[in-house]
Image (cartoon, grey):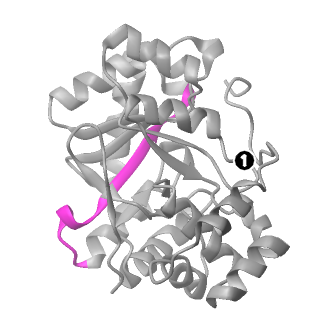
Amino acid sequence: MTDIPRIELNDGTSMPVLGFGVFKVPAEEAARTVGEALRVGYRSIDTAWGYFNEEGVGQAIRDSGLDRDEIHVTTKVWNSYQGREKALESFETSMANLGLDRLDLLLIHWPAPANDLYVETWETFLELRERGRVTSIGVSNFEPEHLGRIIEATGVVPALNQIELHPYLTQQRLRDFHDLHGIVTEAWGPIARGKVADDPVLREIGAAHGKSAVQVTLRWEVQHRIVTIPKSDNPERIAANLDVFDFDLSAEEMARIDALDRGERTGPHPNELN
């Protein structure tokens, strides 16, 4: 069983530095896929109301035989459910779907700035945390201006910001903001939707370590202390994505990967999705 290091959050809790994402995992496949991930050693699962597979995630957790405290679960509130009443409704729906009475981490899925409800939603998250329903609260796809606004409005800094991040979009400016405020960076799309697999630089570095380009990419993120959540429905790849803790990248190799940045997104810019 792989021993996955944990990363400290600014609220005094911690979470595994590598978890399992379920974006675009079909609802009917979620229980099997997440079950396989838990079987091989993942202990952090990232889902969302908007993925429509929370029920399968919950089923896999129940069927795993693992104690609830062994599994870190994240879900998110979608844009159309921002604002106090709708956010509470979304949260309760997610908890029923998951079959949980306590959530480890709740995120605002996108800032949706045109709707101008993310501050009110963040205030609602504070209520849920104070009531003991949620252990940690954070955001996803927030830019510095969005983060600054909720911090100024409430005095509470998010524990984590989940953003698109991979070697072609290293998000250094945003990561610097996170570091300044004690916010953990989490990467979605950590292998650029598979594009890294054929990258010659990553393949060359991988060959030196007996690893794939994907494994090198995940190791690069882990060494930067970025929480990463790769996704796969293939059992071999699920296991391989976890096999990144038995080697280290040199400072030169890390710099070569950093230099691959070209500001290339696979998803929308946070200011454009509402």
Nearer to us in this view, 38 or 227 = 227
Residue 79 in percent (x, y) is at 56, 28
Residue 154 in percent (x, y) is at 32, 12
Nearer to us in this view, 239 or 254 = 254
Residue at the front extreme? 252
Q: Residue at x 50, y 48 (%)?
A: 186
Q: How many marks?
A: 1
Quarter of the rendering containing residue 163: top right
Question: Where 239 falls versus 88 (above or below)?
Answer: below
Q: Quadrant of the N terminus?
A: bottom left
Amino acid at the residue labelled 1: Leu
Q: Residue at x 59, y 26 (%)?
A: 143
Is residue 141 shown to the viewer in this render? no
Nearer to us in this view, 201 or 67 = 201
Residue 122 in percent (x, y) is at 38, 21
Q: Residue at x 41, y 20 (%)?
A: 121
Q: In screen coordinates, is 156 left or right of 222?
A: left
Neighbour tally class for label 1: few under 14, some 14-19, many 20 plus, Cα within 10 Å? some
Residue 259 in percent (x, y) is at 76, 54
Q: Residue at x 75, y 73 (%)?
A: 202
Membership of 271 in magenta stretch: no
Residue at the bottom extreme? 210
Question: Where 122 falls versus 25 (above or below)?
Answer: above
Quarter of the rendering containing residue 145: top right
According to the image, label 1 marks what residue?
169
Is residue 161 shown to the viewer in this render? yes
Which residues are the magenta region? 65-79
